[in-house]
Image: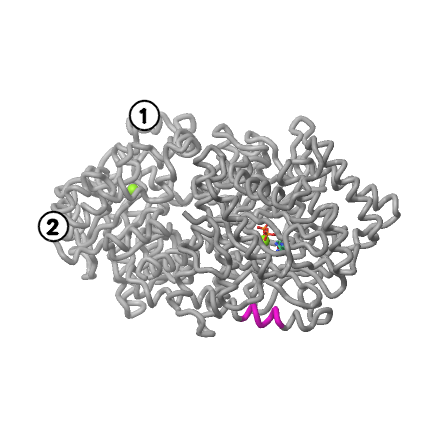
Amino acid sequence: MRYVYDYDEEAPGGRELLGGKGVGLAEMTALGVPVPAGFTITTDACRAYMANGKQVPEGLDEEVGEHIARLERVAGKRFGDPADPLLVSVRSGAAVSMPGMMDTILNLGLNDVSVEGQAASTGNPRFAYDSYRRLIQMYGEVVDGVDAHRFESALSSLKAARGVANDLDLGAEDLRELIRTFQRIYEEEVGYGFPQDPREQLRRAYRAVFDSWDAPRAQVYRRTYEIADDIGTAVNVVQMVFGNKGESSGTGVCFTRDPSTGEAGLYGEFLVNAQGEDVVAGIRTPEPIERMRERLPEAYAELVRTLERLEQHYRDMQDIEFTVEEGTLFLLQTRTGKRTAAAALRIAVEMAEEGLITREEAVARIDPGQLDQLLHPMIDPTAEIEVAAQGLNASPGAASGQIVLDADTAEERGKAGDDVILVRWETTPDDIHGLIQARGVLTAHGGMTSHAAVVARGMGRPCVAGCEGLSIDAAAGTVTIGEHELRAGDVITIDGGTGRVIVGPVRLVPPAIDENFGTILGWADALRRLRVRANADTPEDAAKAREFGAEGIGLCRTEHMFMAPDRLPVVQEMIMAATEEARRAALDRLLPVQQADFEGIFEAMAGFPVTIRLLDPPLHEFLPDPEEASSDAMRARIAQLHESNPMLGTRGCRLGLQHPEIYEMQVRAIVRAARAVAERTGAAPLVEIMHPLVGFGEELRRLRDLTDRVAAEEPSVEYRCGTMIELPRACIRADEIAEVADFCSFGTNDLTQTTMGFSRDDAEGKFLTFYLEHGILERNPFEVLDQEGVGELMKIAVARGRGTKADLKMGICGEHGGEPRSVAFCHRIGLDYVSCSPYRVPLARLAAAQAAL
Ligand code: ADP
Ligand code: MG
Ligand code: MG
């Protein structure tokens, strides 16, 4: 078994074996990009080490020794040479990029003797001492766990004693003194002197990398992002190149395109006379990358050329780290760059237009989940903001509101119409009532799967979780956010799409589809087979849905029309009516109102199908609470309509069959509206009348008779008559249902409830949240379709329904219709369309295209 591969060798594996960093360095070497020489100790070695009870696998130390010898030949320097030593960095690098792993050790190989040799051979003592003090510091912290503060405060005291503010103002002698101080700290903390044997330094360093795989912070990270625990990390040993050799040296980080806007052209920062992570450490303020053009013109030109090649090679935006040693450029890392949703769109469009990638690839590259960021209210990109603290982007969207520290107050104030942000150390199921009424949630603890995050995503509320800069003194009613001291009632803004927290209100902008987004969606439309419709109950929603590209309405709920304040009294009168005659009289008054609603929707959706679902909820939902009833008669009726489990009670078609006059009125209103719109506009609406909660063919047969009979009484209009499939029995008997249905639409909200025996209202925020937090369920089945359970029933329904009627039109109108994984499933099982809320239509269009690729 071989465990070590040089960068210029062919290795028998890629990222899984060499880690992301190792594979990048090897590929760059093969491309002829300037990269220092070095080698990778594979993830196999790490896994063997772990499996061995943290014993280095046999032969590894020798194998590393052979590769060091080879590196010595390439570099023309010897490891441990007292006059001109070979120095290396030791770097961790797993297959997936993982902050929280071991920090890099630079300048490994120096000791008390060779540092003098290096000072002499380079003629630059300051540089040599700076390198050595960095080694003692990094090695001490990383390998032996010495408290970083001890080194930092020693450095600060020295600067204070010399009256200088900047590390660069310390001279060679100062640094030599610092080395002695650092060595004393090391010895005090570790119990013996700083190791002088470079080979021992190296052995201990790469063991420390293996060990860091198990460090608590790495474990937490893996759990948060669902990374397997057993893949292990690789170790990279890389010849040092030095950015701290003076004014013609430096170090930097750079993207090939702007990661927040996607604009083409280098975007990054760089620092002259600096090493390693000085750029990100914030000790000195780096300069924008363009300044490098003036300071180091040749290295800059080489950087531009190199990045062009890397982008051409990887065909994607790269995020790179580099160092310039006395004018010569070296790349130290490349990886595909993370980017905002807006940048992802722009980059994909422009790369396709440049011919670097195909349109299919451009479409495939966009993460529909990330697009969610763009489909919620956002912070106005032109607003000047100061970020007070940064947390996890747990649920997208931005919101401003007053700080509220407990759920009861959040509920009370939210109900009173105030905009509030619930700010907590963490949330628990007992806070759910406050979450519901808050504009957003901010927590100090917890990750992407914390209670607050899960619940907020479920409700579409913005949430920033795990915000370390937040602390709360609930008793005093104060919170600290970053540097700011605030009180309950003060306004803050959270951006759940990026995790930013801002003090004070910020201008928000409603979501819109910009040009790049539009282009990608246009390409997606050409690729997908699934049609995408929207769930919309009003002409306004229908118009919004059209704007987002909906090709029809998959679900128009008529009960919302009954709830409007001017109509509810008439609806109540209808429900209260003692005789059928009185009931019909009330319905006659509702008819023109419903007709007007339908006309508005048909007009907004001209040319596209509109599925109207007849009344679904139980009648008691239209009556007040008993205490608020206006008469004894009403109280009696409420009592009479009471059900112990309304979700499974007299609702849907059961209601329509018992009270045919209600559905008759609705059918009449639909048909008349269609007629009126056809006459007015010259185009007949595509009408689909849908009966809810059917479980038996016989139910639909009778309702179809009712529909056809009423329609025949009106001037002729074309329509289709179908049903929702939202009961397990309806799936299983889809063959008999299909005999009388022109179309079927899966109502997966109810189908999930009825398949699982979960009442959604009693599950979310309660046992379901417990299930998710404790890993009994991986995902909320009301968000992501349960393909193994509910999905199997859907497959049965498709097969049996189309067995009866080969061209039976089938779709989905539950909220899953806008969830990317569920959309892909709908594509696979052969549905004709998905229907989702208007704001999710763009996501569904993209997901449908990706499913078809
Ligand atoms: P991370 O995974 O945190 O990015 P790296 O292993 O990339 O850690 O190292 C961090 C930084 O250390 C690099 O960006 C680079 O500036 C510096 N570095 C690492 N190896 C070398 C080397 N061989 N020569 C010079 N600088 C190096
Ligand atoms: Mg790096
Ligand atoms: Mg339903």
Is residue 304 shown in magenta? yes
Up-down: is 256 above or below 392? below
Is residue 159 shown in magenta? no
First along the sequence among labels 2 and 1: 1
User: Around disc 2, counting alpha carbons within 10 Å, would you say few (fewer than 14), some (14 to 19), or many (20 or more)?
Assistant: some
Whether the residues at callouts 2 and 1 have beta carbons within 8 Å, the answer is no
Image quadrant assignment for residue 532: bottom left
Q: Nearer the viewer, residue 602 or 553?
A: 553
User: Around disc 1, counting alpha carbons within 10 Å, would you say few (fewer than 14), some (14 to 19), or many (20 or more)?
Assistant: few
Q: Amino acid at mark 2?
A: Glu
Q: Amino acid at mark 1?
A: Ala
Residue 459 appearing in the image:
no
Residue 272: numbered disc:
none
Which residues fall within the magenta stretch?
302-308
Q: Residue at x 51, y 46 (%)?
A: 62
- Where residue 240 appears, x then y in whole percent? 64, 56
